[in-house]
Image (cartoon, rainbow, N blue to C red):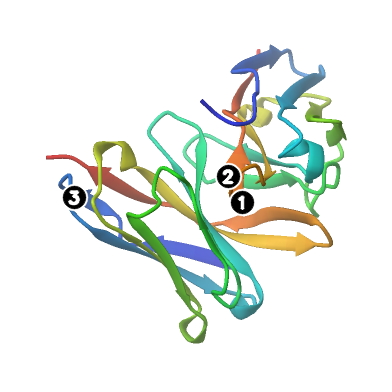
Amino acid sequence: QSVLTQPPSVSAAPGQKVTISCSGSSSNIGNNYVSWYQQLPGTAPKLLIYDNNKRPSGIPDRFSGSKSGTSATLGITGLQTGDEADYYCGTWDSSLSARGVFGGGTKLTVL
Amino acid sequence: EVQLVESGGGLVQPGGSLRLSCAASGFTFSSYSMNWVRQAPGKGLEWVSYISSSSSTIYYADSVKGRFTISRDNAKNSLYLQMNSLRDEDTAVYYCAREVVVAAARWFDPWGQGTLVTVSS
């Protein structure tokens, strides 16, 4: 059971748009910044979004992030088959003792 | 190029021990906090442990507290994870990840390629 809640899977056709939600609480998302990671099959996670909505260099502007209250959202437009991957949200939690927390991951299928 | 390379994984019996290493290059290792994150087969990411740049602050996930010890050697640009009293549920790919902090925001970048730890009799 992950601290952050994500849908297990989402799907859309090439060229379409998809959003992935990440729900938390005041001890994590509500008071900390959210990052998103892309994990292509058989590879290590890679930073996709940091500081809620910023993209590292090399990440196309098709990827966007937002945060409101205790939830965050990853948006992907102009879907490509190469976007098929697992996506994870992450942040820091300070409820009892400081710890990193992730969502359970969302499998994106580009139909 | 900023790079992290893990090593030390392998097959170990329940109750056994293993020490993972993470070699850092391409950045000033001593200026960054570091983390270990693991991923059980077919499962999601689970944060394991954090160590500050000077080793003065350390955190552990409840699932490994008292069994795992994180450490670092800034002179050798290396991060370690000593894992004792291993259990079947510790089977996972273990990643080391650099923590980047700007103001109050923090994130993991980059991640190493991971090293597989299998706990089985």
Q: Is residue A1 visible?
A: yes
Mark 3 or mark 2, which is nearer to you? 3
Q: What distance separates the C-alpha of mark 1 from that of mark 3? A: 30 Å
Q: What distance separates the C-alpha of mark 2 from that of mark 1? A: 22 Å
Q: The C terminus of chain A is located in which quarter?
A: top right
- Same chain? Circles 3 and 2: no
**Element assignment for label 1:** loop
**Element assignment for label 3:** strand
From the viewer's perspective, tell me whether residue B14 is left or right of residue B35: left
Classify 10 Å Cα crowding around label 3: few (below 14), some (14-19), many (20 and above).
some
Q: Position of residue B66 (x, y in %)?
A: 35, 55
Classify 10 Å Cα crowding around label 2: few (below 14), some (14-19), many (20 and above).
many
Q: What distance separates the C-alpha of mark 3 from that of mark 2? A: 25 Å
Question: Can you identify the residue that label 1 sits on?
Answer: A98
Q: Nearer the viewer, residue B64 or B112?
A: B64
Q: Residue at x 78, y 45 (%)?
A: A32
Q: Residue at x 79, y 52 (%)?
A: A56
Q: Position of residue A12 (x, y in %)?
A: 72, 13
Q: Outermost residue toward the front?
A: A96
Return the chain for callout 3. B
Return the chain for callout 1. A
Is mark 1 in CB contact (under 8 Å) with mark 3? no
Question: Can you identify the residue that label 2 sits on?
Answer: A45
From the viewer's perspective, tell me whether residue A103 is left or right of residue B76: right
From the viewer's perspective, tell me whether residue B36 is left or right of residue B21: right
Question: Can you identify the residue that label 3 sits on?
Answer: B12
Return the chain for callout 2. A
Give the mark nearest the N terminus, 2 or 1. Answer: 2
Q: Position of residue A81 (x, y in %)?
A: 66, 25
Is mark 3 in CB contact (under 8 Å) with mark 2? no
